Amino acid sequence: MKNCIFCDDFLSPEKGELIWRGDDCRVILVNEPLLPGFCRVIWNRHVSEMSDLSFGERDVLMSLVFAVEETVRQVMQPSKMNLASFGNHVPHIHWHVIPRYADDAFFPGSAWSEKVQETPAPILEARKERARGLGAAIRAAISQLH
């Protein structure tokens, strides 16, 4: 696919911060100021559907998704975790791993809903501070997979 934003390895600050990259996948800390800790697990090769992956590739991908989800839960201490894989706008396999809180800007809707409330600034800043530790924690969790 031409112009696929996930095939482009260049990461601008708007796209996020590369946390980890392996042969098959990479993990990005998404630059989403209202949802600190939002990560994305992206399949490196351009593939549109999960069923296009071999069973072994599916295992690799989902092991990473679960490792990232568990680590985000431990570090960010959310009320709930959201896992999502759509690909409607970008038909390239990727999973969203999103910590959610009753006071986040979009709750109870999805992360793509209209903003319905303001998270108190001190709480949001504390979450941003915790998210700064995610990179090292996720790399450590992934190293345990191999």
Image (spheres, rainbow, N blue to C red):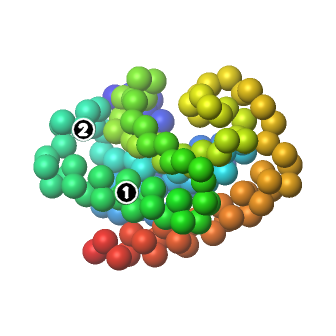
Q: Residue 125 placed where, x, y %?
A: 80, 56
- Residue type, label 1: Phe
In this image, 5 relative to 108: left or right?
left
Q: Position of residue 53 (x, y in %)?
A: 19, 43
Quadrant of the image containing the N terminus: top left
Q: Nearer the viewer, residue 65 or 76?
A: 76
Report crowding for label 1: few under 14, some 14 to 19, many 20 or more residues within 10 A (C-alpha).
some
Q: Do tag 2 and tag 1 residues touch (Cβ < 8 Å)?
A: no
The residue identified by callout 1 is: 66
Q: Quadrant of residue 144?
A: bottom left
Residue drawn at point x = 66 percent, y = 51 percent: 36
Location of mark 2 (residue): 50
Q: Is residue 26 left or right of residue 78?
A: left
> Where is residue 56 shown, x and y percent of the image?
15, 55
- Point out which mark residue 26 bears: none
Query: Foreground mark, 2 or 1?
Result: 1
Q: Secondary structure at mark 1?
A: helix
Mark 2 element type: helix
Q: Which residue is located at x 86 percent, y 49 percent?
A: 121
Q: Quadrant of residue 100?
A: top right
